[in-house]
């Protein structure tokens, strides 16, 4: 698939080294529809491609929104772009969150750091009353208060959901922080969670997801009710190059969202 040219319609700096782009087609045509949890390959001319999750609303069908952390050659090149500049896009790719299964259920959204970005389309769908969830609870953790992603939206989200936000550390730079300090598993351990009629979506560092899944299993959630988004070195995005092979799966094609019950044996193998 050849990249399609998109123009940067908006750029917002979230915090140091992390920014959000809204991309539109130069012709004004609507881009291909996407599912929450899918990703695009973003192409920076002369620097290469990088897989970036969708982080916008499915109801905003005029654009793609991506939140990007600057941590490699391609993302550093993209970081230098501004409104009006052109970028290449391939996609959407992958399997998304199972939103068609959440009607009548309690939904747990558990995110760490930049892992909130692939879950924001889910949050928007639930905010807009889609899919008929019975209750929504968001557990979000970041390293420091100044690294809380989308914090300007928390107040709106809290009007509709139960939200728990925690940070790992709060130093002298973060004196104004009055919220929780500690790892995300602590409020998750303390929460009363019914094992019946509950579904959990997780995205974040693998060590965080590993401990959160352990907590959910202790609380009686079945493996089939736990979904996670995985990150691997994706290159072709079609399962042909083999860079993202994970056990018998290709993360770009069979994921990035997986049911924990189907990948448990691979997920629990360290360094795979």
Image: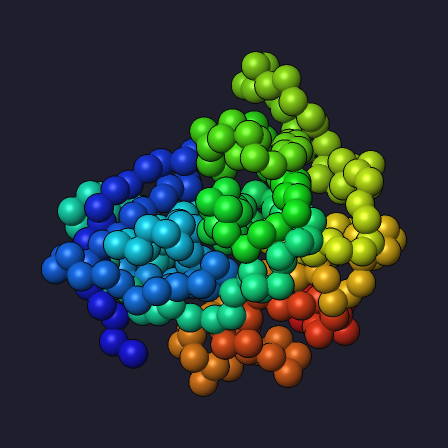
Q: Position of residue 164 (x, y in %)?
A: 66, 33
Question: Quadrant of residue 198 in the image?
Answer: bottom right
Residue 201 left/right relative to 223: left
Q: Position of residue 208 (x, y in %)?
A: 69, 49
Residue 120 left/right relative to 26: right
Q: Is residue 114 visible from the viewing direction of this image? A: no
Q: Is residue 30 or residue 11 the one in the foreground?
A: 30
Q: Position of residue 152 (x, y in %)?
A: 45, 29
- Quarter of the figure that contains the N terminus: bottom left
Residue at x-position 56% and y-position 64%? 100
Q: Is residue 173 or residue 224 the one in the foreground?
A: 224
Residue at x-position 74% and y-position 67%? 224
Residue at x-position 50% and y-position 42%? 127
Q: Position of residue 50 (x, y in %)?
A: 39, 62
- Quarter of the figure that contains the C terminus: bottom right
Q: Is residue 91 visible from the viewing direction of this image? A: yes
Q: Is residue 192 or residue 17 the one in the foreground?
A: 192
Residue 150 left/right relative to 259: left
Residue 158 left/right relative to 39: right
């Amino acid at each position: 698939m050849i990249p399609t040219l998109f123009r940067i319609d908006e750029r917002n700096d979230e915090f140091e080294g992390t920014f959000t782009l809204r991309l539109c087609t130069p012709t004004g045509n609507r881009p291909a529809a996407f599912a929450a949890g899918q990703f695009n390959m973003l192409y920076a001319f002369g620097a290469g491609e990088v897989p970036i999750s969708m982080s916008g609303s499915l109801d905003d069908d005029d654009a793609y929104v991506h939140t990007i952390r600057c941590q490699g050659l391609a993302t550093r090149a993209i970081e230098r772009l501004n409104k009006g500049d052109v970028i290449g896009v391939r996609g959407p790719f992958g399997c998304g969150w199972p939103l068609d299964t959440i009607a009548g259920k309690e939904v747990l959204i558990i995110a760490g750091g930049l892992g909130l970005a692939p879950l924001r389309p889910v949050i928007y769908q639930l905010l807009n009353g889609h899919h008929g969830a019975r209750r929504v609870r968001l557990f979000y953790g970041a390293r420091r208060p100044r690294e809380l992603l989308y914090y300007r939206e928390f107040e709106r989200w809290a009007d509709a959901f139960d939200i728990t936000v925690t940070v790992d550390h709060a130093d002298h730079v973060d004196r104004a922080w009055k919220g929780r300090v500690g790892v995300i598993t602590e409020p998750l351990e303390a929460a009363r969670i019914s094992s019946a009629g509950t579904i959990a979506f997780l995205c974040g560092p693998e060590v965080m997801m590993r401990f959160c899944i352990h907590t959910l299993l202790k609380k009686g959630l079945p493996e089939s009710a736990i979904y996670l988004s995985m990150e691997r070195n994706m290159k072709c995005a079609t399962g042909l190059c083999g860079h993202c092979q994970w056990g018998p799966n290709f993360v770009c094609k069979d994921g990035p969202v997986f049911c924990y019950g189907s990948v448990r044996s691979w997920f629990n193998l360290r360094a795979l």
